[in-house]
Image (tube, helix red, strand yellow):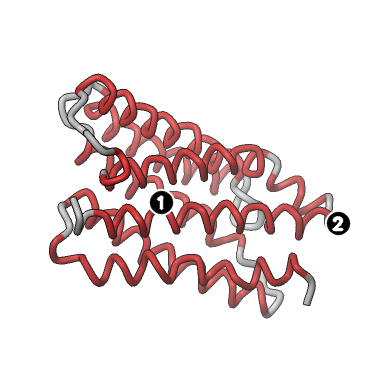
Amino acid sequence: MTFTTFLLASSPLALVLPVFTGVRYFKQLPKPYKVISIHVWGAAIAEVTCYILWWYNKNNLFMFPFFTLWEFEMISLFYVLLLKNIAIRHIIPFLMVLFALLTFADIRFVNGLTHFNSYSRSIEGIIVIGYAIAYFYKILSELEVIRLERDPAFWISVAFLVYFSGSLFLFIFGDYVIHHSYNTYGVYWGMHTIIMWILYTMIAIGLWSTSKA
């Protein structure tokens, strides 16, 4: 087994810690973090399903648009609950509806279910980066958070910022790599797996820190 293959095979394991943490503390989690826990559980189901299909050399690209929509809606709901007294909070529900329409338009008219959903994935990444920046603006302007390392939303927002910033160009060129550059396919998804491990590890820390906040 090559290192790249090992990385790809390890991708479902990245969700073990946040899934366990979400289950362990779910009853005491505030509403925004309950949303994140539910999102992680959905992501775990999708990741395991994609892995099984990949292992048996079956096309799993049809799952990506639906997972992207699920991920965007859950992250958006998280920030609706988190970003109180900020104007962007009132824009997010509109973005949720618009993104759902764009996703189905992408399926129907552009990429279908046999190509990587580069457009919707890239748009999702840009918007979520905007959400994270809005949260950082909130904590810098209000100065209510004394110790950032104990703030669950800080960990989760940094996780989203790192993941979507690091993956944005992978999303943009994803369909080209999958269909036209087989030699870099493994490297592409290997890089994505590393970034995904960072994402879910930081989310797990964020969920765990709610019990210490």
Which image quadrant for residue 208?
Answer: bottom left
The amino acid type found where label 2 is placed reads Asn
Which of disc 1 and disc 2 is earlier in sequence? 1
Q: Kindly identify which numbered label has been placed on residue 165.
A: none
Please determine whether, in this image, residue 111 is positioned above or below residue 140.
below
| Disc 1 target residue | 71
State the residue at coordinates (30%, 38%): 148
Q: Is residue 14 left or right of residue 158?
A: right
State the residue at coordinates (22%, 57%): 34
State the residue at coordinates (76%, 45%): 176
The amino acid type found where label 1 is placed reads Glu
| Front-most of residues 213 and 62 | 213
| Disc 2 target residue | 183
Q: Position of residue 46 (x, y in %)?
A: 47, 67
| Front-most of residues 213 and 11 | 213
Q: Quadrant of the N terminus?
A: bottom right
